[in-house]
Every structure is written in structure tokens, then in C-alpha cells.
Amino acid sequence: MHDPRKPRPLKLRSLNVLVVDANGFTRTLIGEILRNLGVSDIACARDAKAARAFLRDRLIDVVLVSSEAADALDNLDFIRSIRRIDDSRLRRLPVVLVTYGLTRQTVLAGRDAGADEFLAKPISPAALLQRLQMVIETPRPFVDSAVFLGPCRRRKNPADYYGARRRAGERAVERPVMVDQDDVARETPIRRTLARLREMCVSRPETLNAVIEEMKIAKEAAIDQNDQALHTGLTAFESYMVLATPLGEIDLAVVETALTALEQFSALPPAFAEARESVAAALDNAIQKKCAA
């Protein structure tokens, strides 16, 4: 049985991943993205009890912990519970924290709880693959002490230092700077447009004309990308806003579901058909349910 902190080549077909999330839709979505990446052995748990059973009964290589403030699952407490397990291998398993709206405070809290890496929602397959590569191919050293249990909290590995104070003989090979795929995904034109749309819908939902104009820009971007599914989702959301705004009946829960779905569409390449179908179904269900009420 391999040491989870020993670097090794990432082989997706033989990787065993545990997805822990209280939300059934998100569990399914992450599972489908993993399958599209080539991971075939995926276990899913809705709560800490089920997750611990999987850890006890199955060989797991990586744990993805995904949750939001409204979920029943306390993601940080669950990560801390992993770090307190008596079994040394389980205690040292790589853990990736998946959450919406990563902030400095989120990263600091996750780091102190024992998370290895962080992945932002909406989930970009390229970013998820990058995180898997990081925890399998270049895992951070594990600290097992009386005051802290978890991966080394220093985000920079001293062994990767190539500055002026590095001994000259050790600077022969220059390391390429890693490009964070989460940052790349956030800076695409469609993601920037959807970010503006989110700001308008959440903070100023009554400004219908501005919202519709921003949706028009987003739909044009979807057409330019030949993304029919995203265009269809935007059209459905537009129909809801046109109907609900004049009546003063905007349901912010529906708006949040729609925006989250649209952002997830934009992060999923067309090749991830099954994951996109799940997002489309969730969006359509939320809007249809509200319109029929």
C-alpha cells in the first residue's frame, strides 16, 4: 500500500477518489467531471458518517470535500476529523476543499483545518485535474505534531526556491511558473460577463433593462463559442426575469440557482456532455417549478 505523501505519477484510471458533499446535485456533477477526466473509481458520501465508512472499507487516494455555508456538512470539521484518525495512512490522505467564492479567509481556515489544496466553484475540469496532479505528483510534506496535523501550511516548498540566495549549483534547472487553472477560467470573456450579470441580479435585480442587456452580451458570447446549452440556459433565465421582475416576484433562490448553473456551464467544455446535462436539468427544474407556482 503506497504512502499518500510519496510523489508518484498521476494515473487517472487507477485513482480512487472520495467525493463528500451534502448536496446531491453537486456530488453527481463532480462525479461526472471526474469520469470525463478518466477517473473510474469514485465513491460519493453525503455526510461525515458515510464518508468515514468509505475511508474505512475502501482504498481511497484523494478526498474532495465540497460544501457551502447552508449545507448540513461542516467541511472544516470533517477535514479536522480526517487528520485525527489513528490510522497513519488515512490521516495523511490528500484533501482538496471545493467551495464557491474562495477568499483569503477561506484558504486560511481550510489550511489550518488540514486541507492540501483548494478548488473554486464553478468547477473547471482543467483546474480539478491540476489539483489532482498537485496532490499526487507533488504532495506537500505532512506535519504530525502535538500542535498541528496536516500538510505543511507553508504554500511555497523551500526545495523549489531558485532565488539569489539559492546555492549556484542548485539553480541549473529553472522551474516553470505554474499557471493556476482556476484563474485562467475566471478570466474568460463569458465568465467576466456572467460575473457582471451576477452582480446586477443579486444587488440590483430591479434594473431589468440592464440585466437583459447583459444577458444579450452573454448570449452573443455563447453563440461565438458555439455553446448551444449555455445559450439555452441564458434564454430560460431571461424568460424568468422578464416574467418575474415587473410583478415584483423575483425569487432570489431561483436567481442564485440559475446563476450558479450558468457559471458552471461556462466552466465545462462541450465534451463534458453528461455533466452539462445535469446542470441543464437543475436549471430547468428550478425555473419551471417557480413559473408553475
Image (spheres, rainbow, N blue to C red):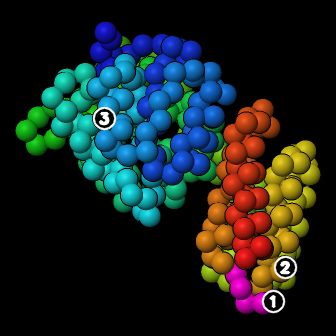
* Distance (Cα) linking label 2 and label 3: 46 Å
Whether residue 113 sits left or right of residue 26 in the image: it is: left
Q: Earlier in the sequence, mark 2 or mark 3?
A: 3
The label nearer to you, 1 versus 3, is 3
Q: Which residues are magenta?
A: 246-250
Tell me the amino acid under the disc marked 3: Arg
Which residue is rendered at x = 74% and y = 43% of the image?
276
Q: Nearer the viewer, residue 281 or 98?
A: 281
User: Can residue 180 be spotted in the picture?
Assistant: yes
Q: Residues within 10 Å of mark 3 (few under 14, many from 20)?
A: some
Q: Which mark is residue 258?
A: none
Tell me the amino acid under the disc marked 1: Pro
Image height check: is 214 above or below 135? below
Which residue is rendered at x = 75% and y = 43% of the image?
277
The quarter of the displayed image where residue 40 is located:
top right
The quarter of the displayed image where residue 150 is located:
top left
Label 2 sits on a secondary structure element that is helix
Q: Position of residue 49 (x, y in %)?
A: 31, 41
Q: Which residue is labeled 1 in the image?
A: 246
Q: Is mark 2 in CB contact (under 8 Å) with mark 1?
A: yes
Tell me the amino acid under the disc marked 2: Val
Q: Is mark 1 in CB contact (under 8 Å) with mark 3?
A: no
* Distance (Cα) linking label 1 and label 3: 49 Å
Q: Which mark is residue 52?
A: 3
Whether residue 143 sits left or right of residue 24 in the image: it is: left
Label 1 sits on a secondary structure element that is loop
Q: Which residue is labeled 2 in the image?
A: 242
Q: Position of residue 37 (x, y in %)?
A: 63, 26
* Distance (Cα) linking label 2 and label 1: 7 Å
Q: Is residue 248 magenta?
A: yes
Q: Residues within 10 Å of mark 1 (few under 14, many from 20)?
A: few
Label 3 sits on a secondary structure element that is helix
